[in-house]
Image (cartoon, rainbow, N blue to C red):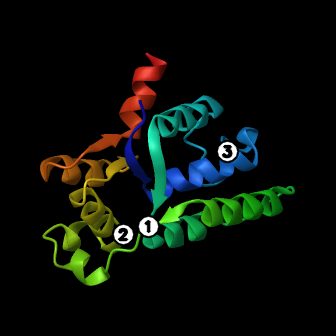
Amino acid sequence: MARQTLILDANLIVLLVVGLADEHAVPKHKRTRAYTTNDFRLLLNVISEYRELAVLPNALSEASNLLEFEGNGLPEKIFRRFLQFVSTTREIYIPSLSAIERAEFQRLGLTDSVTLEAGKAGIHILSADLGLYLAAISAGYSAANFIHAIEAARA
């Protein structure tokens, strides 16, 4: 049975988009070099366990900036995949005012604080960012650290 709604942090959106464009580009792209093609496949498996993947506009903006559409024909592929991802994924809007009122805002910034607000609403958070993950867990929200999943898969 599929779980609840899942949101990804900006770094995992970048990994997903780059991998969907060309999984062999994952270890080559400037922002995904720390990951392998197996890590990308693991992300797909994790996503498949959820009823729905949703995104936050803040995370999409960060991901767009991080993609830095670069080199060897990848820009067009990545751009097309990003467009497809945005057009086929439900976008959840959370007002910035709600996020900046959070105690974590000064330490984590706007995007992570908006993500925590989504967690407060019962949406599961998947992050590669330890600070965001720890804040979510500390607040009692449903969250997972993708790095832990990678380490478990590699063990």
Question: In the drawing, what numbered circle is on residue 111?
Answer: 2
Give the residue drawn at x 30%, y 71%: 109
- Cα separation, mark 1 vs mark 2, equals 8 Å
For mark 3, give the secondary structure: helix
Q: Earlier in the sequence, mark 2 or mark 3?
A: 3
* Residue 112 versus residue 130 in the image, above or below: below
Q: Position of residue 121 (x, y in %)?
A: 24, 60
Residue 89 in sight in this render? yes
> Image check: 120 left or right of 72?
left
* Callout 2 amino acid: Thr
Asked if marks 1 and 3 touch (Cβ < 8 Å), the reply is no
Vertical arrangement, residue 119 with respect to residue 152, above or below: below
Which label sits on residue 56? 1
| Amino acid type at image mark 1 | Leu
In-image side of 133 versus 28 (left or right): left
Q: Which residue is mark 3?
A: 19
